[in-house]
Amino acid sequence: MVQKIRIIDAKDHVDEEVKIGVWLTDKRSSGKISFLQLRDGSAFFQGVVVKSQVSEEVFETAKGLHQENSFYVTGVIHEDSRSHFGYEIEVSDIEVVCESEGYPITPKEHGVDFLLDNRHLWLRSKRPFAIMQIRNEMIRATYEFFNQEGFIKIDPPILTGSAPEGTTELFHIEYFDNDAYLSQSGQLYMEAGAQAFGKVFSFGPVFRAEKSKTRRHLTEFWMIEPEMAFTNQAESLEVQEKYIAYLVQSVIDNCEYPLHLLDRDIETLKKYTKLPYPRLSYDDAIKMLQAAGYETKWGDDFGAPEETYISDQFEQPVFVMNYPKAIKPFYMKPDPTRDDVYLCADLLAPEGYGEIIGGSERETDYETLKQQIQAAGLDEKEYEWYLDLRRYGSTPHSGFGLGFERAITWICHLDHLREAIPFPRMINRIYP
């Protein structure tokens, strides 16, 4: 009986007859040979149908195939030095499973809006295939890294009654007789987890009702949010850079084929695995920008142009540290040597991709945190449980949040976050 395999396993079956379930992505014919471009969800490669070596029925079937027909091919695997994948199948038989005519995404160029309207089909194409393969590897590597570092995964709620960073950018819903919101962060719950388990992380969807159309924003995205008890900000930065370097190295080691499909330069990625990453104070970042002609003044937050300029001055990701209190959330710990900045940092990715991580040491004193909640205009009653964490065995603790799609966009060198998630949600898009 002929063994059934996947394309990705072709290297283990050279000169063997196998059977593969595939879809047709394209084809061409010279009259006596049909070249079938095939995919099976694991990789893309070529099937060769030689008229003189198959029955007339098989050759006519090959000629009649349409884009996205599903079928089984039987044949012998050969090495193919002309393709990056390195293998092809010499087809001896074709068994059609389902016809497909009029497939809307043809090999020609299509506009982004058209492709997003057909995202359920666009995922089959080489570019999104490669991106989702890299996304999957980054998910695998994330779990591996935090498990190796002694973290456990805690799942925060998606429905919350309060907002860590205010309610202006939250999706409001009616929760029976109460107001509720789709979570914008699991951080506060991770702090509770850290006081119970020491080191925890979450990985899940979060929601921001930002009316933004920039390439850096989605309304639904995924966050990695670790939190660590008995950990100061300097120690947290070491975990952050170690995690990023681990992600990049895992992609280099395990995603050569997807990186090739995206034309992503591996030598460039290798630079991002070298530690430590540079640290730049917010004060010095302001001076750097002003010296370059930017009108940014102390106390301003950085937008895309400023973040791009700063990151362009370094060959690695760079931490910008200790931002003014006025532009950061209430839960951060003030710098003990200054009363105007927090112990916090943003990690800016190279190549113009901006912030991918935000983190800080957290305020541990009950009275100070209570005052900061009041100063932020938040309802103290909604944060009683959060204040309990300071009443009962408070510890120094720090944490951070990584925007997963932002990290994917940077590592894959994409133009927009919408390609980094299977079904993007933006201000003007909730279909399909």
Image: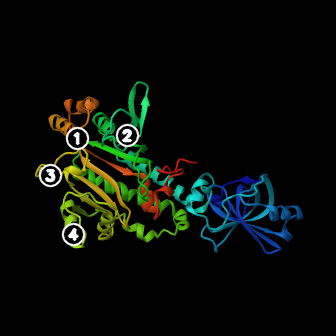
Q: Secondary structure at mark 2?
A: strand
In this rendering, would 247 be left or right of 306?
Answer: right
| Residue ID for mark 2 | 152
Q: Amino acid at mark 3?
A: Asp
Q: Is residue 324 visible?
A: yes
Residue 216, image x and y in percent?
Answer: 41, 57
Residue 169, image x and y in percent?
Answer: 36, 44
Q: Is residue 157 visible?
A: no
Q: Amino acid at mark 2?
A: Ile
Q: Secondary structure at mark 4?
A: helix
Q: Residues within 10 Å of mark 3 (few under 14, many from 20)?
A: some
Residue 430, image x and y in percent?
Answer: 53, 47
Label drawn at residue 290: 4
Which comes before the other along the chain, label 1 or label 4? Answer: 4
Nearest the viewer among 103 and 81 is: 103
Which comes before the other along the chain, label 3 or label 1? Answer: 3
The Cα–Cα distance between marks 2 and 1, rounded to whole angstroms, is 31 Å
Q: Secondary structure at mark 3?
A: loop
Q: Residues within 10 Å of mark 1 (few under 14, many from 20)?
A: some
Which comes before the other along the chain, label 2 or label 3? Answer: 2
The Cα–Cα distance between marks 2 and 4, rounded to whole angstroms, is 43 Å
The answer to whether 197 is drawn above or below residue 222 in the figure is above
Look at 15% across and 38% down and name the residue there.
368
Residue 201, image x and y in percent?
Answer: 36, 43
Label drawn at residue 376: 1
